[in-house]
Image (spheres, coloured by chain):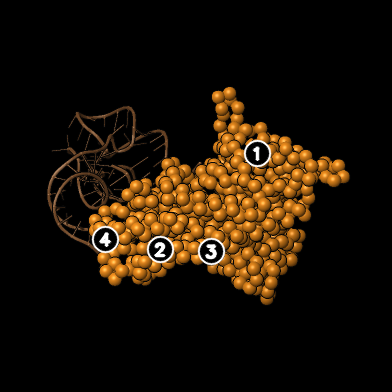
RNA sequence: CGGGGCGUAGCGCAGUCUGGUAGCGCACCUGCCUUGGGCGCAGGGGGUCGGAGGUUCAAGUCCUCUCGCCCCGACCA
């Protein structure tokens, strides 16, 4: 394309609403514009990048045996009622009625719809395995959309679903999708890590997230420095439990007045003790009814997913003020495991087993207990791995230690089991003539989020540095002075010849000063820039600069087209 | 949902405290000039000051309500 004919409104200044770098650069490079919170226009350059991501996804999934379909974005309530999610999904589900007052939602994900399709058409075990995917606009009415395309309300997702006769076959497909996802993100030119993930409220038992490594990522991931273990921090296990601190001469229990000191930090400062001497006492309501006391060391953080696993619970929720007072007889801030009003289950993190000389709430207003000895004072606890992992914790798989990194979740693979097939009665007859619910897997990729993640990971002060496979165009040709015929005709010829070779090239035919063109080229992030200027042309040459390099090299005009085409070809082959 | 911030030209902002003819930079249009990293000069167009109501001789400015956007937290996967 000629730049004079293109709709690329670049901005010199950053619109005030943008916070993170991908959002700023997408706006400045004229790729997106915000329409409402979490909802965006995609301009021509933005669409080209989206299509690049989509095409890679499409090719790799097709290669892996999946088939593309397109399901409705507007879905009838009945299917969601059948799965139970109409009530459970909450306000994130955008609901509305048609003119006949029938209820619909804008699909945030499509397990129900695809399972409905499959149950109507599939009868025999001979019809499976079946793996279907779509690339579609989704809507989730997020409480707090933010960071541009990183967490929008409307976004483009590749969602895939597979159907199998038994668990073994489903797990085989899971592994195949895992491998396909690796190829997809490799081909996108991204640095990422597959990590073990919490299975969350969707249900199911096995899941990996694909996390693009970037400091601005919303997720924390734990990875081992010695083996390939990596997990979302919510899920990450701790190899060797931290031994509890013990004091030499066990002290007797004693009340100590702590007026108005509720948080660990406040009490620790007040008593001049370090936080690891405290037993943090949290009350949880488990599965909506049972009150459970949960203990972690004062300097540790509880992981709710781990708590859920440890208790075998469906839901856990921090207890409200009234519940805390009912169980402890004290206002919030003074709870402890000793002398509770009601006998309740107590679970404690490993790091508290055997602790002595500790401090905890006394279950009395403005009072804490010192000299606490776990074995003596509250022996009746269940020990479990409950806390959030920290840097230098032991790896659960090897002798190594773990480190923390930030990541952007761009994909997730999930073994679902028969949750939806059972709810929606999607069954097949097996070889013995028995009706069996289909085993399912689900596989998602955030296409728009991948686009943002690529920028978070690939940019500099001047703008985006697109990996070649995702760039909206591969090459920009910049004639330094459009008015000068010699430069114009050379630029034009290079442009025509590159186009003929199938190179995605833009000709900056604007009558602008060179500085403006260079700034825009850097901002937009074309991987290759060809500068046609009087100095080099005098020597029969043009300049070639890669976006990621600092310097340009001069190449003879006659060789330029072949050299550039080869660079693009070889560059793409590298992914 | 709780806390905080902001809505003035396409973008970035000043003006609001202390009411009195709506401004600046960039962008845009015209002309000249210039052309290797966001040139220079001259001229010009563009605003229901987010919206509604109120106070006042007079409201961008004060009061009430409301809508939108951003950040932190809670929530959610």
Q: Tell me, for residue A561, which label it has, or none.
A: 2
Between the C-alphas of marks 1 and 4, the distance is 60 Å
**Circle 1 sits in a helix, a strand or a loop, which is it?**
helix
Asked if marks 3 and 2 touch (Cβ < 8 Å), the reply is no
Q: Is residue A552 above or below residue A320?
A: below
Identify the residue under disc 1: A113
Query: Label 1 lies in what chain?
Result: A
Give the x, y percent position of residue A155: 52, 46
Q: Residue at x 35, y 58 (%)?
A: A493
**For discs 1 and 2, the disc positioned in front in the rendered view:** 2
For label 2, the crowd category at 10 Å Cα-Cα, with few meaning under 14, some 14 to 19 and many 20 or more, is many
Instruction: Say whether mark 4 and mark 1 are on the same chain.
Output: yes
Q: Earlier in the sequence, mark 3 or mark 2?
A: 2
Q: Give the residue furthest to the right.
A: A432
Asked if marks 4 and 3 touch (Cβ < 8 Å), the reply is no
**For discs 4 and 3, the disc positioned in front in the rendered view:** 4
- Viewer-nearest residue: B41 or B7: B41
Identify the residue under disc 3: A573
**For discs 3 and 2, the disc positioned in front in the rendered view:** 2
Q: Is residue A392 above or below residue A317?
A: below
Q: Can residue A367 be seen here?
A: no
**Circle 4 sits in a helix, a strand or a loop, which is it?**
helix
Q: Which chain is orange?
A: A
Identify the residue under disc 4: A486
Q: Can residue A33 be seen here?
A: yes
Between the C-alphas of marks 4 and 3, the distance is 35 Å
Q: Earlier in the sequence, mark 4 or mark 3?
A: 4
Query: Label 2 lies in what chain?
Result: A
Colour of chain B, in one word, is brown
């Amino acid at each position: 394309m000629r730049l004079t004919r293109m709709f690329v409104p670049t901005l010199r200044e950053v619109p005030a609403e943008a916070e993170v770098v991908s959002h700023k650069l997408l706006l400045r490079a004229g790729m997106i514009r915000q329409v409402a919170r979490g909802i965006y226009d995609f301009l021509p350059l933005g669409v080209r990048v989206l299509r690049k991501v989509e095409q890679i996804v499409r090719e790799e999934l097709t290669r892996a045996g999946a088939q593309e379909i397109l399901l409705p974005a507007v879905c009838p309530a009945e299917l969601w009622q059948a799965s139970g999610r109409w009530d459970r999904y909450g306000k994130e589900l955008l609901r509305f009625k048609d003119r006949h007052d029938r209820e619909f939602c804008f699909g945030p994900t499509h397990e129900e719809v695809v399972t409905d399709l499959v149950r109507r058409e599939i009868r025999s075990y001979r019809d499976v395995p079946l793996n279907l995917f779509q690339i579609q606009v989704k809507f989730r009415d997020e409480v707090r959309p933010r960071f541009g395309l990183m967490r929008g309300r409307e976004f483009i997702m590749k969602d895939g679903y597979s159907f199998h006769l038994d668990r073994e076959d489903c797990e085989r497909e899971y592994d195949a999708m895992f491998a396909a996802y690796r190829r997809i993100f490799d081909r996108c030119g991204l640095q990422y890590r597959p990590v073990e993930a919490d299975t969350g409220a969707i249900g199911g038992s096995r899941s990996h997230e694909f996390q693009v490594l970037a400091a601005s990522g919303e997720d924390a991931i734990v990875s081992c420095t010695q083996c390939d273990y990596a997990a979302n921090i919510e899920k990450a296990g701790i190899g060797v439990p931290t031994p509890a601190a013990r004091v030499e001469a066990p002290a007797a229990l004693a009340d100590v007045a702590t007026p108005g000191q509720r948080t660990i930090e406040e009490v620790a400062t007040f008593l001049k003790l370090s936080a690891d001497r405290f037993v943090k006492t949290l009350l949880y309501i488990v599965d909506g009814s049972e009150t459970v006391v949960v203990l972690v060391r004062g300097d540790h953080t509880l992981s709710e997913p781990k708590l859920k696993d440890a208790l075998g619970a469906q839901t856990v929720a921090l207890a409200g003020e009234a519940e805390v007072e009912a169980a402890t007889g004290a206002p919030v801030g003074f709870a402890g495991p000793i002398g509770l009003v009601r006998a309740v289950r107590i679970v404690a993190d490993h790091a508290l087993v055997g602790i002595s000389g500790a401090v905890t709430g006394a279950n009395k207003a403005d009072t804490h207990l010192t000299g606490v000895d776990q074995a003596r004072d509250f022996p009746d606890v269940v020990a479990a791995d409950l806390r959030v992992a920290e840097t230098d914790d032991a790896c659960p798989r090897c002798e190594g230690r773990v480190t923390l990194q930030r990541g952007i979740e761009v994909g997730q693979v999930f073994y679902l089991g028969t949750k939806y097939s059972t709810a929606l009665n999607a069954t097949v007859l097996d070889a013995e003539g028995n009706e069996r619910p289909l085993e399912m897997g689900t596989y998602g990729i955030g296409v728009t989020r991948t686009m943002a993640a690529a920028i978070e990971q690939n940019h500099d002060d001047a703008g985006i540095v697109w990996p070649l496979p995702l760039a909206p165009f591969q090459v920009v040709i910049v004639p330094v002075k459009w008015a000068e015929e010699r430069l114009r005709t050379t630029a034009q010829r290079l442009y025509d010849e590159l186009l003929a070779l199938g190179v995605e090239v833009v000709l900056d035919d604007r009558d602008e000063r060179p500085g403006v063109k260079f700034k825009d080229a850097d901002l937009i992030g074309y991987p290759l820039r060809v500068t046609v200027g009087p100095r080099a042309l005098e020597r029969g040459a043009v300049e070639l600069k890669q976006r990621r390099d600092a310097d340009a090299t001069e190449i003879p005009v006659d060789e330029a087209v072949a050299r550039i085409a080869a660079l693009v070809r070889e560059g793409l082959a590298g992914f």
